[in-house]
Amino acid sequence: MRREFGAVCCAVLLLLAGCQGLGAGVDEGTPTGTDETLTVTENGTEQPTDSTVLELRNESGSSTVRPDPETDRLGWENGYWHNDSLDVDNTDGLNDTELSAVVNRSMARIEYVRGLEFEENVSVNTVSRAEYRNQSGSGSYGDALRTFDNAKFEALFLIGEDDSSIEVQESTLGDSVLGYYSPSLDEIVIVTNSETPRIGEKTLSHELVHALQDQQFGLEGNASTRDALQGRNALIEGDARTVETAYLNRCGSSWSCVRVGQSSGGGGSSDLHFGVFYMIYFPYSDGTSFVAELRDRGGWRAVNDAYDDIPEGAREVTTPTDYPEWEPREVTLPAPPSDDWERVRPSADRDRPDYATVGPSAIAATMAYTVVDEYNTSSSVVSRFALGDRDTVDTDPYNYDLSGTSGWDGGRMQVYTKDGETGYVWRTAWTDEQSAEAFATSWERVIQHWGGERTADGNWVIAEESPFGDAVAVHVEGDTVTVVNAPTEAELTELYDA
């Protein structure tokens, strides 16, 4: 089973890393010079208004140029209509003139699909992958934040004690990111692997949606915890992927599109940590189905309204029927019984809470990682790393709503240090006792997978050769579960006395 699973995993990673289509250059598609004039309504539907035959722009100037509208309108930007053809050659990269034409036409196409107007131009630049990795280096983090983040990812059984969690996350992103939009700079950056930057409309369209979202709704609001960030980003990325898919579905039929050759992100994925990737991919995977649910309720208007009522966590995304009424339960933790342990406060380095909230998407990533890790190949907590139906792998490849994640209702993790060692106390709240028991059972299977053995006192001691060689206790108290970690079993009660 694990061999078959590995093959599926590789296929999914290639897909998620951002395959840009087959072949280089321009996909000529179907000529669109006889399209009727279209009006795009608020929800993105097309309504013919007359039967005027429209000739398309040709960069050589040999054909009649479709006239510009008297005023700006959806589906037209800076002299380009959404269904214009372009005489550009992307095999050796785009020059400044070609890039400007492609960007403006893509902006018009985004307007046409999404039914929203760009309010200003968007700058698009390129950067090599090596330069991107260098720019996103981890040198700006303080000791408190590093200690806290290391403990958090150790608590999730994703990154062991001997590795830097920040560097692993940055390596994973550096190997898979194809582009990004910066709200603070109002700028799109395309990450390229080629010596001569080539830009395709797949990545460009996705990032242009983010620019449009920022202009219409604002994207600079900060989510304070990991789970809150997953809820916020699921709306943003689900919106972008929905528009990107509708956009690309027109390529080769209604629109001619600029493509680049097939790419798998960093060209080798050797630095990609599957467990971390599974967690950070949540907004892209489940965000699309969340946005589809909103559109079923009220079209694009319902999606627009959601920016004023951002999902509060991954639960509302995996279970859209909970949106927007659900709110995470406030969870508190008592001070440790021993004064020897000092609280780690990452706010000393950055403006952020002194605790973590890791929700169901992070828990699902922990379980999925047990299928592909190299430490223990004889067991896993879930089968087929929660891969969804293969028929829908391109739109919703992973399943985050698992036994052990369903019913998550809130959580809080606090990190402590003593004599250079770290420990943590992590309490999760659940909708009912059955859900709490299901999580506790799954989590003890995770501990066992990583070399844990139950002691006479009911705690767990993980083998020293494991990346997570510590002592762990799991306490179920009604509809809450408290997980405690310390270097030794004797020290568990110094952090939490059940």
Image (cartoon, grey):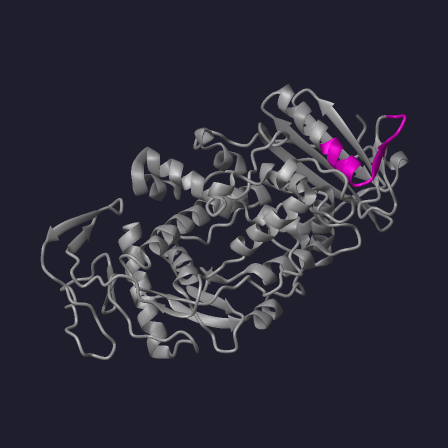
446 in magenta? yes
Give coordinates of residue 53: x percent, y percent. 11, 61
Placement of 12 over or under 286, stated as above or below: below
Res 217 seen here: no
Q: Residue at x 34, y 44 (%)?
A: 304
Looking at this view, is 389 or 307 the one in front?
389
Please indicate whether residue 248 sits to the left or right of residue 425 in the image. left
Res 5 seen here: yes
Q: Tell me the quarter of the picture where residue 448 sits.
A: top right
Give coordinates of residue 423: x percent, y percent. 79, 42
335 in magenta? no
Looking at this view, is 1 or 18 the one in front?
1
Start and end of the magenta stretch?
A: 443-457
Q: Quadrant of the N terminus?
A: top right
Looking at this view, is 335 or 228 the one in front?
228
Looking at this view, is 143 or 290 the one in front?
290
Placement of 285 over or under 444, stated as above or below: below
Give coordinates of residue 113: x percent, y percent. 29, 52
Placement of 470 over or under 14, stated as above or below: above
Please indicate whether residue 457 sits to the left or right of residue 61 in the image. right
Placement of 424 over or under 118, stated as above or below: above
Q: Residue at x 32, y 59 (%)?
A: 252
Give coordinates of residue 35: x percent, y percent. 17, 58
Q: Quadrant of the C terminus?
A: top right
